[in-house]
Image (cartoon, grey):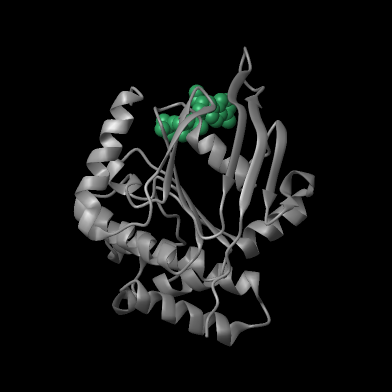
Amino acid sequence: METTATATLECRNLTKTFYSTDPPAQVLNGIDLKVEAGEFLVVMGASGSGKSTLLYSISGMDRPTSGSVLLQGRDLTSLNDTQMSQVRLTQMGFIFQRSHFLGNLNIRDNILLPALKASPHDREAAIARVDSLMGRFGITAIKRHGITEASGGQLQRASISRALASEPAILFADEPTGALNSSMSKEVMDALSDVHAGGRTIVMVTHDPGCAARGDRVIYLRDGLLVDSRHLGTWSQDQATQREDELSDWLRNLGF
Ligand SMILES: Nc1ncnc2c1ncn2[C@@H]1O[C@H](COP(=O)(O)OP(=O)(O)OP(=O)(O)O)[C@@H](O)[C@H]1O
């Protein structure tokens, strides 16, 4: 039976200041957060509140100024760049608002590439995983297509397949539906709900209460501080509207 890799993620007193501006920009001002194994955590807040900076700081894409980040108990801030790259490659998956794919490779080879890099000695297994993921997310029919021949929703599902192909313990998503219309957005969120149901830890930044309603818990940032959070419990499609309405009320009260 397939076991899903999953991990806890914890940050303690996390700060981030960008010194490239004058005056320096203090963007994260001491964030304490624990994401449980298998949890789907959503990060919300007004534009500029520090959501992406938090995501980058806890996923090793950028280094925090101070504080610690523990992935399954291991402090990522103590790793050098090579060690951090290896953790990102083998234990983390990433999805962004716009997927970046190589134009000279078809969709399947784009998905396969990082999986082969993560486990170069296990080519057959990587191919089998990629084909299985493409089937699971409904994109097998376009596997030999070029990047320009896929819709935005298909590309984001390809992006999710690529992120999962190396069997990461945690998936980070930064506005994964930000560039999609509502039906494509639903396709992508259905795929993420499916990933979550499989037990993987997910941390997602979004502006959209409908997407946020998929999570187990939503945290709200203001000026680089975690000012409130809301537990939603397990997602169910039947309660989608109710969950979104409740979240929207909560967000309105927070001034969103
Ligand atoms: N590399 C950088 N150098 C200087 N300032 C930065 C840098 N990256 C982000 N910032 C600043 O940090 C603040 C927070 O940015 P961040 O992208 O984390 O916010 P956000 O909440 O994700 O916003 P949005 O919803 O608009 O994407 C902004 O004021 C931004 O200008």
Q: Position of residue 147 (x, y in %)?
A: 36, 64
Q: Can residue 61 be seen in this view?
A: no
Relative to 219, residue 200 above or below? below
Instruction: Count every numbered label the image shows and give the total.
Output: 0
Q: Position of residue 19 (x, y in %)?
A: 67, 22
Q: Which residue is drawn at 39% across and 47% down?
A: 97
Relative to 43, residue 25 above or below? above
Name the image quarter holding residue 107.
bottom left
Name the image quarter holding residue 224.
top right
Quarter of the image that includes the C terminus: top left
Q: Residue at x 38, y 52 (%)?
A: 233
Q: Where is residue 176 in the image (x, y as percent from the top left)?
A: 38, 50
On the picture, is 70 further left or further right than 115? right
Q: Residue at x 47, y 74 (%)?
A: 109
Q: Is residue 135 visible?
A: yes
Q: Residue at x 47, y 77 (%)?
A: 130
Q: Nearer the viewer, residue 89 or 216?
A: 216
On the picture, is 200 further left or further right than 149? right
Relative to 211, residue 237 above or below? below
Q: Where is residue 74 in the image (x, y as percent from the top left)?
A: 74, 53
